[in-house]
Amino acid sequence: MAVAFDEMNIPGGDLRPAYQELARWLKETPPEALEYRRQEAELLFRRIGITFAVYGDSESTERLIPFDVIPRIMSGKEWALLEKGLKQRVRALNMFLRDIYHGRDILRAEVVPDDLIFQNPVFRPEMNGQQVPHDVYVHIAGIDIVRVDAEDFIVLEDNARTPSGVSYMLENREIMMRLFPDLFARHRVAPVERYPDELLAALRSVAPQSASGEPTVALLTPGVYNSAYYEHSFLADKLGIELVEGRDLIVKNNEVFMRTTEGVKRVDVIYRRVDDDFLDPLTFRPDSVLGVPGLMSAYAAGNITLANAVGTGIADDKAIYSYMPDIVKFYLGEEPILKNVPTWRCREPKDLAYVLDNLGELVVKEVHGSGGYGMLIGPAATKATIEAFREKLKREPEGFIAQPTLALSTCPTCTATGLAPRHVDLRPFVLTGSKSTTIVPGGLTRVALKEGSLVVNSSQGGGTKDTWILDE
Amino acid sequence: MLSRTAENLYWLARYVERAEYLARTIDATLRVTALPAAYIGKTNEWDSALLTAGVAASFYQTYEEANEHNVVEYLSFSSNNPSSIRNCIEAARLNSRSVRTALTSEMWDTINSAWIELQEVWNKGTSTREDLAKFLRFVQETSLRFDGSAYRTMLRNDAYWFSRMGVHLERADNTARILDVKYHVLLPEEEHVGGPLDFYQWTSILRSVSALTAYHWVYRETLKPWLIADLLILNDTLPRSLASCYGNLVRNLDQIGVAYGRQGPAQRHARGIRNRLEHSNMNDIFQHGVHEFIQEFIADNSRLGEIITKQYLI
């Protein structure tokens, strides 16, 4: 694997302009001071209760995501390009979903194969012909971005269902401002704090027609045992909306109500953080206790807006991902600004043959997997793991895609032996309302804390960093 | 507000109040059992502690003897006892997480940091008396901090009133339970069969409701059992008296009634109990039978809990 692109240091000893002030500051700041702040940050996270749960880990049901105090910095110019690319990508995602559940032009034009849609478990036939307000399907998108050089931004994954992590973007900034006021004074960092306002505005803008002038928005959570529960309560609080569980909601005459101490109250928009499968036991999994019986019929009647819409999984599927450049071109007639990672579709015999021959160098992912589970990183895997994967691939090739192992960019990060480069990615959050698409400048930077590791997922030992976009 | 949120706030306050009460009970029992046997007579104070906590029956399913070790263990640390201090704190934290949006950050911080701090106590236990005393003090301080931050930081709206109702309902129950277990040492002089031994029982009762100093301020008298009963039942200047708890419950329910523009069975029921307390005096109560009076009160109080639940919380 080639030497990774470092976002601070240019080979030969020079610094990239965005990092010059930080480098100066790091020189002036003794390492103990940094360590002390790091501990302080951890204490703050624990006291605020910013924790997440790792499923299948009974030892510690609540864990902290390690926070790295060295910010990741991007210039305003870099951000402008990224922002443009993200808006383009999300517009295309929304048009694609609208098309898939209505006219299906893209299938007729044979840009995307039929069976990839119709045989896909995340395709929701319930959504066929269903109108969603303003044709917005993906109100909140989390697009995972990586860099391998100074020029390009590459999309690693589109998250169009219930992307999480935005609370870390906001809390990381709060904590950084508290711990390093002097460092902030020396930079002009674009603020992220208006995210909750923009989210609320976007959610209100897509209320159904039958809603009152002041639509009621609620956030639907699976409950305190969900791994992202902290984020749910955090967002509900910042948005000033009720945090509801399935049992708080009832459906009467195809309208959705929440049970309050003053009787029932109509809800117009649900920002749901519950997966499709669990939303309505009458339509989807009958054993779900997290959902609301009858919700889908209220949805079909147009009395409730769900954000994100039902059935968006078809757009963030890893097999569909490989078609994204074509999807962008098909709907927008534009060249995609953000690149895709070259992807081999194991469902295609030629690709599969290549993948099987080169397993040791590739990253193989489950089409429906997430969170870094069920993934093979060839260069880091043992022979036995590779062989096991080979068998899986042969048995069910359509369940996998493969990509080259990218040398993700690195950023300076605190480690036990001082500052060292670690691999990072970035998840900006793209909001789409009835009229506009907005992105607060920044996002969640995830960092693989282990030396050489490329896995940034928090469930697998990744940490986070504050992400600074310089306002120039 | 969401019914579930109101329910969580109400129970959160109850759990914290209960934890404090248990800590006080253990504390008071430790003091009285430290006295030479000649001063306290033959009653098993650890048995009384279990009774006032309302967990005697379940205790004897696991343990044979009510001694200091077993009772402290069961009331403080046992995860099998649903109302041990440990389970109260755990439940309070869980409730807090579910209603974070309705709590101020100060309240959350109190519960969360207490919970974090106590993990170590759960893991290691308290090996010395000193450790135990520190733990009991910490629990009481947590409750004070929680109460204080609620008082100082919460908006005065239904969230606050539901939380206050939890405090007062639980407090009334706790005070009534002590009276229920100890009524026999509080009978008036002529009926009283005890002796000077009871002095230590009386201080113990007052201590468990943090009213020892208050007694002297109110009555300016040596300890008299019927005055202690008067203080705990009828004196509405004592925050843990039944009368005070009901004054507050009626007020909170009225505030909710006004805010929602409608009253219901909870308001009527609470007012009924308050009126009975207001129009009683100790003579009548003694004549009627203290024990009967207290038992009726406990039943009425838990009935109010049910009515509130039905009217607002589900």
Image: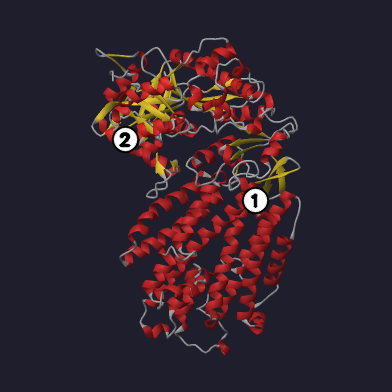
Where is residue A41 drawn, in percent x and y? Answer: 37, 37
Residue A39 shows in the view? yes
Q: Is residue B47 left or right of residue A13?
A: right
Where is residue A252 drawn, in percent x and y? Answer: 74, 44
* Chain bearing mark 1: B
Q: Label 2 is placed on what type of residue?
A: Thr
Where is residue A104 drawn, in percent x and y? Answer: 63, 20
Q: Pointer 2: what residue?
A: A385
Pick the quarter of the image with the C terminus of chain B: bottom right
Residue B158 drawn above or below residue A151: below
Q: Are marks 2 and 1 in contact (CB under 8 Å)?
A: no
Q: Pointer 1: what residue?
A: B3
Residue A456 drawn above or below residue A56: above
Residue A67 shows in the view? no
Residue A121 drawn above or below residue B280: above
Q: Label 1 is placed on what type of residue?
A: Ser
Front-lying residue, A462 or B210? A462
Where is residue A112 drawn, in percent x and y? Answer: 55, 19
Front-lying residue, A351 or A463? A351
- Crowd class of label 2 (few under 14; some 14 to 19; many from 20; radius 10 Å): few
| The image quarter in which residue B165 lies | bottom right
As helix, strand or loop, the secondary structure at mark 1 comes to helix
Q: Residue at x 56, y 35 (%)?
A: A238
The colouring scheme, among rainbow, by chain, secondary structure or one colour, is: secondary structure
Mark 2 or 1: the one toward you: 2
Q: Label 2, label 1: how many angstroms apart (C-alpha)?
A: 51 Å
Q: Residue at x 68, y 75 (%)?
A: B280
Q: Is residue B142 left or right of residue A202?
A: left
- Crowd class of label 1 (few under 14; some 14 to 19; many from 20; radius 10 Å): many
